[in-house]
Amino acid sequence: MENAIGILLTIGSLVFMLGLGYFVGGWRERSHIQDLDRRESGNGDFVITQVKTAMDVSVNGPPPTLLIGEAVIASDYLKTFLASLRNLFGGEVRSYRTLMERARREALQRIVEQARQAGYNAVCNVRMQAADVGGSNVAGKKAMVMAAILVSATAYRREG
């Protein structure tokens, strides 16, 4: 009888954690994506390029400057569990793609917000660097997976 209760508690806690990851993690991801969509929709007049040279630089504006932004997005329990199952069988872990995409978009929005606050209306030479800050095995322990993106860009004031 005690063994059955122990098994039920173990299974129950697993189901609870997976449910928590599904409902809360999904809700947080959807709300973050909606927030990113809202923030990006307000940047229609802002120029973002990966070109190394600034175009149409205003001579009366502030001098171009380097801006750096970063974002770290952590995985939830469900994505981590499903990814570990996917690793057993092989294949692409699609849920991590959304983690990286959200981190990229968030870091870029932070650059745009910094540039706007400083009086700039364009950034060029946008560079993104990814880092694995939590997904590696550290001392034999598996850590929670996180996507970290570092973005650098040159902000400048455009004519017109």
Image (cartoon, rainbow, N blue to C red):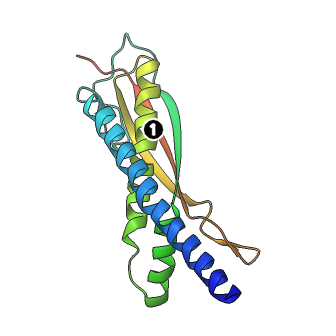
Q: Classify 10 Å Cα crowding around label 1: few (below 14), some (14-19), many (20 and above).
A: many
Direction from residue 139 to residue 91 in the image, left or right: left
The residue sitting at 43% across, 28% down in the picture is 113
* Foreground pick, 125 / 37: 37
Locate the N terminus by quadrant: bottom right
* Foreground pick, 97 / 50: 97
Name the residue beneath numbered marker 1: 153
Direction from residue 44 to residue 104 in the image, left or right: right
* Foreground pick, 17 / 113: 17
Direction from residue 125 to residue 13 in the image, left or right: right
Give the x, y percent position of residue 112.
Answer: 40, 31
Q: Amino acid at mark 1?
A: Ala
Query: Mark 1: which secondary structure?
Result: strand
The residue sitting at 43% across, 65% down in the picture is 96
Give the x, y percent position of residue 88.
Answer: 49, 88
* Position above or below: 43 against 51: above
| Residue 46 image-quadrant placement | top left
Locate the C terminus by quadrant: top left
The residue sitting at 64% across, 81% down in the picture is 5
* Position above or below: 78 against 102: below
| Residue 97 image-quadrant placement | bottom left
Give the x, y percent position of residue 45.
Answer: 24, 26
The residue sitting at 45% across, 19% down in the picture is 117
